[in-house]
Amino acid sequence: MAAFPAPGATDVSPQTSIVLRTDFDALPAGLALLANGSQVPLPAISKLGPGLTPAGHAIFFQLYGPLMPSTNYALVIAGSATGASGPSPVELTHFSTSATYDKAQGTAPVINSVRLWRAHYPESEVGAGGCVFAAYEGYFDIDFAAGTVPGTPPEEVVSILTISSRQTDLLQSLVFMGLDQLPGGFVTSAGGNIPLAGGGALSAPQALWKPVLEADGTTCATISTFGRNNLAAPSLQSNTVCVPVTSVDSPHLTPGAGGAGAAGVTGGAGASGSAGAPGATGTTRGSSGCAVMPAGTARGGSALVLAALGLMAARRRRK
């Protein structure tokens, strides 16, 4: 669990939202905001949703300001250790605000390209320890330039990838911090689960977020970004890129066999078979060590997640 602005930050714009990052789907017990040592009412709080950091999966919350100028703040939660005067609070962050603020505009993220795939697997691979959780799974590859926010360290900039369908009202989002590459499952090597005709492959273990994608549909992607001073500065939103979803089959599919659908979607017909039955939303089964986050859910980190995300963070530092 962590909160931002990070501990020790100074001259933070009072027009700044506090961001809380946690492993839990609900706010922690005893959350309190202290101003110059005295408890003050919490700002309005919204749930940004599940996401990724270099440390693994997380759930993000946003505490809207404004904050008071020239003030020392601390965000704390109730502690478990009990002393003579009761449980001691645990500090998540402490920082101080500046006397004034400006409306300096940052640099919006830019999406250069997007590729989307809807992969079809045989039932024998679902939940069999290979990080495949449903007969139909979504994979993506997005090339983008991360946005920047004045006065905000790059590792504290919050971005939200939003994927929307032109055919339905389906809207999905992924929050991320400290990453300029997203693990959508596309790999340049040929060692993945499903080789691609244009080169590379789709790898189920490397896809740490799998959005629900519709066969033959058109899906649009945008990225919004914010950091400190977000209540005063103009919003930062990328261009929107819309692309068709490409359907691909696992090489282990039996010709003519209809597959089961995922997340309530009816499976497609095989070459000589009938359409498969609707499938259930993917869940982790077995002991493969996978920690994928299907659309709308979040799971705890694992060595696999940390290795993949750590590699991306290292690439970011080298740039």
Image: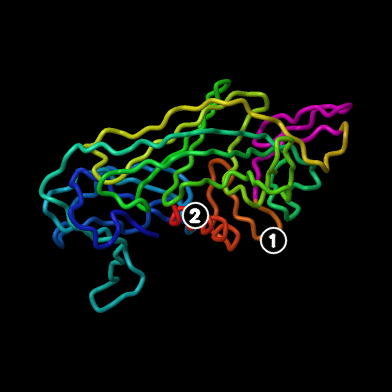
What is the quadrant of the N terminus in the image? bottom left
Q: How many marks can you see?
A: 2
Point out residue 48 in the picture as x, y percentages from the top left corner: 40, 42
Q: Mark 2 sits on what residue? A: 315
Q: Quadrant of residue 259?
A: top right
Please give the label number shown on residue 287: 1
The secondary structure type at the circle numbered 2 is helix
Name the residue located 14 percent from the left edge and 48 percent from the top edge.
Answer: 68
Q: Residue furthest front?
A: 319
> Residue 176 placed where, x, y %?
44, 47
- Left or right of 255 on screen, residue 300: left
Marks 1 and 2, the one that precedes in the sequence: 1
> Where residue 175 sits in the image (x, y, percent)?
45, 44
Q: Residues within 10 Å of mark 2 (few under 14, many from 20)?
A: few
Magenta segment boundaries in residue numbering: 257-283
- The answer to which of 227 and 212 lies nearer the viewer is 227
User: Tag 1's secondary structure?
Assistant: loop
Q: Image height check: is 65 above or below 261?
A: below
- Residue 312 appears left or right of 238: right
The amino acid on which the numbered mark 1 sits, given as a three-letter code, is Ser
- Residue extending furthest toward the top: 167
- The answer to whether 115 is drawn above or below residue 5 in the figure is above
Q: Please give the name of the residue rendered at 28% of the width and 71% of the height, measured from the top-left corner.
A: 88
Disc 2 residue type (three-letter): Arg
